Image (tube, rainbow, N blue to C red):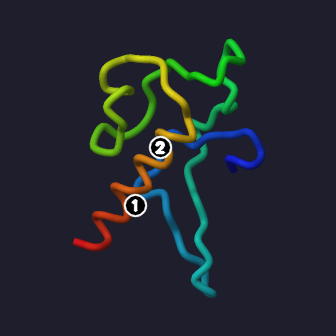
Amino acid sequence: MHNNGRVHRDLKLDNLLLDENYNLIVADLGFTAPSEGKNEDGKLETKRGTPNYLAPEVHEGLPYRGQQVDLFASTICLFNLMT
């Protein structure tokens, strides 16, 4: 997704699925956005996603980089899986 210039913005365990061969499928693409942002400066401003998976800058209402926010949410997913 990131290689195609899109960010998910709502990664969470409920949106991560496995097929019959255990391939990961990312679901619920309703909050996806172009990674370059509305102003094409690489930053997004809209607060989207599930509160427990949001990066601090999103909670604070600051402009953010979508790929970094997706990475933050994926680390929360991994932490939940490990614990």
Gap between marks 1 and 2, in whole Å? 10 Å
**Tag 2's secondary structure?**
loop
Up the image or down, 79 lies above or below 8; here it is: below
Front one among 27 and 9: 9
Image coordinates of residue 66 in percent, x first then y, are 55, 35
Rendered residue at 36%/38% (across/down): 54
Residue 5, percent across and down? 74, 39
The picture places residue 57, in percent across and down from the top left corner, at 36, 26
Judge from the rendering whether residue 30 lies leftward or rightward of residue 36; answer left or right.
left
The quadrant holding residue 14 is bottom left
Seen from the viewer's position, the closer of residues 10 and 82 is 82
Vertically, is 53 above or below 62?
Answer: below
Residue 72 x, y percent position in the rendering: 41, 46
For disc 2, the neighbor class at 10 Å (few under 14, some 14 to 19, many from 20) is many
Which residue is denoted by mark 2 in the rendering? 10
State the residue lying farthest toward the top: 39
* Residue 35 relative to residue 26: left or right: right
| Residue 25's disc number | none
The C terminus, quarter of image:
bottom left
Q: Is residue 63 left or right of residue 34?
A: left
Mark number, residue 13: 1
Which residue is at a point 49% across and 25% down the rendered structure image?
64
Which residue appears at 68% of the width and 12% of the height? 39
Q: Residues within 10 Å of mark 1 (few under 14, many from 20)?
A: some
- Measured along the vertical axis of the image, is residue 54 above or below residue 28? above
Image point 30% across, 37% down: which residue?
A: 51
Q: Which amino acid type is marked by label 2?
A: Asp
- Residue located farthest toward the bottom when viewing the structure as drawn: 21
Q: Residue furthest left?
A: 83
